[in-house]
Amino acid sequence: MRIDLHTHSTASDGTDTPAELVRNAAAAGLDVVALTDHDSTRGHAEAIAALHGLSTGLTLVTGAELSCRLDGVGMHMLAYLFDPEEPELLAERELVRDDRVPRAKSMIAKLNDLGVPVTWDQVARIAGDGSVGRPHIASALVELGVVPTVSDAFTPEWLADGARAYVDKHETDPFEAIRLVKAAGGVTVFAHPGAAKRGRTVPESAIAKLAAAGLDGIEVDHMDHDPQTRDRLRGLAADVGLLTTGSSDYHGSRKTCVLGEYTTDPEIYGEITRRATGAFPVPGAGGRLA
């Protein structure tokens, strides 16, 4: 089985629509794909409809990537198979999403002060119906020739945490995120915890505390982790009893990663589905539930 548990669509900052993402996952030979847009479940219905229209054995895992912050350090929490209508978690996701537009406009103002002629209309066009975020602003910088790639915008010079054009937004305390997701019947996995090139990372001592609070796993096999980081994280997970996942963090053409570039062990996936009570994986029309 080939299982990719971290992807994004146009419902947040990917370039594939939810339907296109499902079709591309099937074409890539995946058995399981998770749709984990930033703080949003808006793409789930379209993805499920597209899945039901395919004669494929692909299974869809519904989820989201929650924006969190711990002691001033930004981090992302993957939440799987939770009830999307659970009131507390829904209210928190909406609070985070509602802060995205004013934050983006403030970052654009900072870029203008730095001499970059980016506009809100340009960023809004790039974001489309998605939840506007830094990758959309980064894409605008690429269009303007300020940086060659989206990744090159996430530096201290431009958009990384604490960078010249960075602006804070409302983000959830990760301990609270774990509580909310658990209450909604979901499973939590700390996304790319060792991605140091994105900026400051949460210390490993904090990961142990998150594990004690109910965190289910950490994403180990990821494009932003070198082999040494993966080995260290795998050892930490074993020490504190966390599941380990692997994922592409696919964003369509916005990033260089491809679907299925890194995958999750089927036994780990099985444990995630066993722990979830808020929702269930959705099987494709041509196959059984993976």
Image: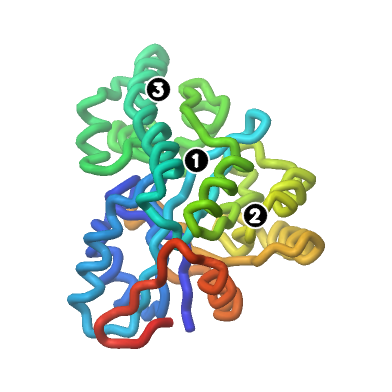
Q: Are marks 1 and 3 in contact (CB under 8 Å)?
A: no
Instruction: Residue at 29% x, 49% y: name it.
Output: 11
Instruction: Residue at 71% x, 57% y: name it.
Output: 229
Q: Please state which amino acid type lies under the numbered disc 3.
A: Met
Q: Are marks 1 and 2 in contact (CB under 8 Å)?
A: no
Comparing labels 1 and 3, the label whose residue is closer to the camera: 1
Task: For label 2, count other residues whose C-alpha is less than 10 Å away and answer few (under 14), some (14-19) or many (20+).
Answer: many
Residue 145 placed where, x, y %? 33, 34
- Numbered disc total: 3
Name the residue carrying label 2: 215
For label 3, the SS is helix
Judging depth in this view, the residue of 211 and 7 nearest the camera is 211
Comparing labels 1 and 2, the label whose residue is closer to the camera: 2
Residue 116 placed where, x, y %? 35, 20
Residue 1 placed where, x, y %? 48, 84
By what rule are the colours in the image chosen? rainbow
Residue 253, quarter of the rendered image? bottom left
In the rendered image, the vertical position of residue 82 relative to residue 143, given as above or below: below
Name the residue carrying label 1: 67
Q: Please state which amino acid type lies under the numbered disc 2.
A: Leu
Residues at marks 1 and 3, CA–CA distance in whole angstroms: 17 Å
Residues at marks 2 and 3, CA–CA distance in whole angstroms: 32 Å
First reached walking from the N terminus: tag 2 or tag 3: 3
Residues at marks 1 and 2, CA–CA distance in whole angstroms: 15 Å
Judging depth in this view, the residue of 119 and 97 nearest the camera is 97
Relative side of 88 to 272, left or right: left
In the rendered image, the vertical position of residue 241 relative to residue 105, given as above or below: below
For label 1, the SS is strand
Name the residue carrying label 3: 107
